[in-house]
Image (cartoon, rainbow, N blue to C red):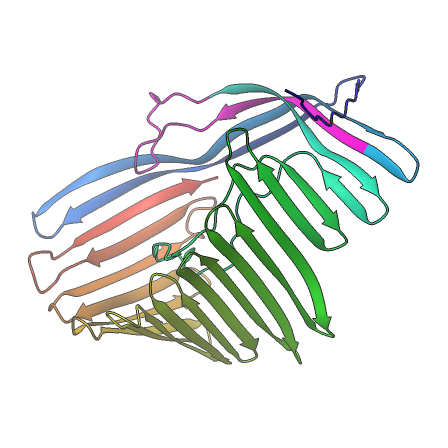
């Protein structure tokens, strides 16, 4: 049995130690008097919250590199270090630390080969492995604060990441032939098609076909971005057009979704339609600022279920305090209201607040009134 191996070796020694520390501490302590209007009870609630407590220290780090010469030569780079991390408190769901939690501490010594190539002019052969997946289409709402679920229908994956890559300028071929017969081949190319027009395309095959492609087009002061992923018969498509004052976002994965946002200073409008092919969940919102008041209105309607809701909020900033009043009503006859006043000037270094919240005033929940003080770092 014959084996063909390409081996690059480098012996690197980094003298001395480099120390760097990063300590981050944030948190708050609060005391609230809460009166439950439904139960007719009241009490004092204390809470501490540690939002981010961590300590990171690099005890030592170093790197080494080596390169040959001539028309055809090899190069390699190696990085290494020793890190200490103290943090990652095991807090409860509320984030409260009551003195019984333990930190997850770690000392980590690591080393990695950052690159290892054989180079001949514009040609480069990389021996650290080949691509094992790609994907370019991303939903415009996957990372929104509303916690919407990722609707990606496909995330093209192939091979095991072993093998070689062969690159020529902006074109790269990956080849992964594992012992035992498994294989994967891929090709990726990036290109400038014209002035203000660029794109990329990638294809792969490991017994099944997958592909990805992107395009970016400059439109005056605006831009058009398009991305498509394929894996078998599944497809993801994302597109956006940003041309002031309008931003149009479209995503197709598990369903079709589209959003239009218009900034008509001082009024901002948006219409977001989710699950167009099934439930047609429509959300309309408008916001503006009048003097020191921030005003927002919202309306939602699900065509598939005939459910609807309306909401609104007004926030007013005074020199001494911030006022907030808001609420909403749904087709299920649920009325909610909330109001608060917060001041950071009554006690220097603390926030004093008085708040009311009722989540279902038409039902059994009349809500609660809370007065408190919070000291934050």
> Measured from the top left, where is residue 63 in percent x and y?
76, 26
> Measured from the top left, where is residue 88 in percent x and y?
45, 29
**Up-down: is 325 above or below 98?**
below
> Measured from the top left, where is residue 8 in percent x and y?
76, 26
Who's the residue at 48% across and 39% down the image?
377
Which residue is nearer to you in this view: 82 or 124?
124
Who's the residue at 53% across and 75% down the image?
241
> What is the quadrant of residue 363 in the picture?
bottom left
Q: Can you name the residue that lies furthest to the front here?
A: 1
Who's the residue at 38% across and 62% down the image?
253
Q: Taking 369 as reference, is 224 left or right? A: right
Q: Quadrant of the N terminus?
A: top right
> Measured from the top left, where is residue 340 in percent x and y?
30, 59
Q: Is residue 81 magenta?
A: yes
Region of the chain picked out in magenta, as a range: 75-104
Which residue is nearer to you in this view: 188 or 41?
188
In this rendering, does residue 289 appear at all? no
Which residue is nearer to you in this view: 332 or 242?
242
Who's the residue at 35% across and 63% down the image?
323
Question: How many labels sit on residues?
Answer: 0
Q: Can you name the residue that lies furthest to the right here?
A: 70
Q: Is residue 90 magenta?
A: yes
In this rendering, does residue 313 appear at all? yes
Q: Taking 182 as reference, is 67 left or right? A: right
> What is the quadrant of residue 337 in the picture?
bottom left
């Amino acid at each position: 049995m014959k084996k063909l191996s390409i081996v690059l070796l480098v012996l690197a020694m980094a003298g001395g130690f480099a120390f760097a520390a990063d300590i981050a501490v944030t948190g708050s302590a609060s005391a609230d008097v809460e009166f439950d209007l439904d139960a007719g009870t009241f009490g004092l609630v204390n809470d501490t919250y540690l939002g981010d407590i961590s300590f990171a220290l690099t005890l030592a780090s170093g790197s080494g590199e080596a390169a040959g010469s001539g028309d055809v030569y090899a190069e390699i780079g190696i990085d290494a270090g020793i890190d200490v991390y103290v943090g990652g408190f095991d807090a409860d769901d509320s984030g409260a630390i009551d003195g019984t939690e333990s930190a997850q501490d770690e000392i980590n010594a690591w080393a990695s080969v950052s690159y290892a190539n054989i180079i001949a002019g514009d040609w480069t052969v990389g021996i650290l492995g080949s691509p094992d997946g790609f994907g370019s289409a991303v939903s415009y709402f996957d990372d929104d604060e509303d916690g919407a679920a990722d609707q990606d229908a496909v995330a093209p994956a192939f091979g095991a990441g072993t093998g070689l890559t062969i690159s020529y300028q902006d074109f790269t071929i990956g080849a992964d032939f594992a012992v035992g017969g498994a294989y994967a081949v891929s090709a990726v190319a990036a290109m400038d098609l014209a002035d203000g027009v660029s794109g990329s395309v990638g294809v792969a095959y490991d017994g099944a076909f997958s592909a990805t492609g992107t395009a970016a087009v400059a439109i005056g002061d605006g831009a058009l971005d398009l991305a498509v992923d394929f894996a078998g018969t599944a497809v993801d498509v994302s597109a956006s057009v940003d041309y002031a004052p309008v931003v149009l976002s479209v995503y197709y994965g598990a369903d079709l979704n589209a959003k239009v946002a218009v900034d008509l200073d001082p009024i901002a409008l948006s219409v977001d339609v989710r699950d167009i092919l099934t439930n047609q969940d429509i959300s309309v919102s408008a916001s503006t600022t009048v003097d020191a008041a921030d005003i927002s209105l919202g309306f939602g309607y699900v065509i598939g279920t005939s459910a609807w809701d309306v909401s609104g909020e007004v926030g007013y900033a005074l020199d001494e305090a911030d006022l907030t009043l808001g609420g909403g009503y749904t087709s299920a006859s649920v009325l909610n209201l909330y109001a608060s006043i917060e001041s950071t000037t009554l006690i220097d270094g603390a926030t004093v607040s008085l708040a009311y919240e009722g989540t279902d005033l038409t039902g059994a929940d009349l809500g609660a009134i809370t007065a408190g003080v919070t000291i934050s770092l």
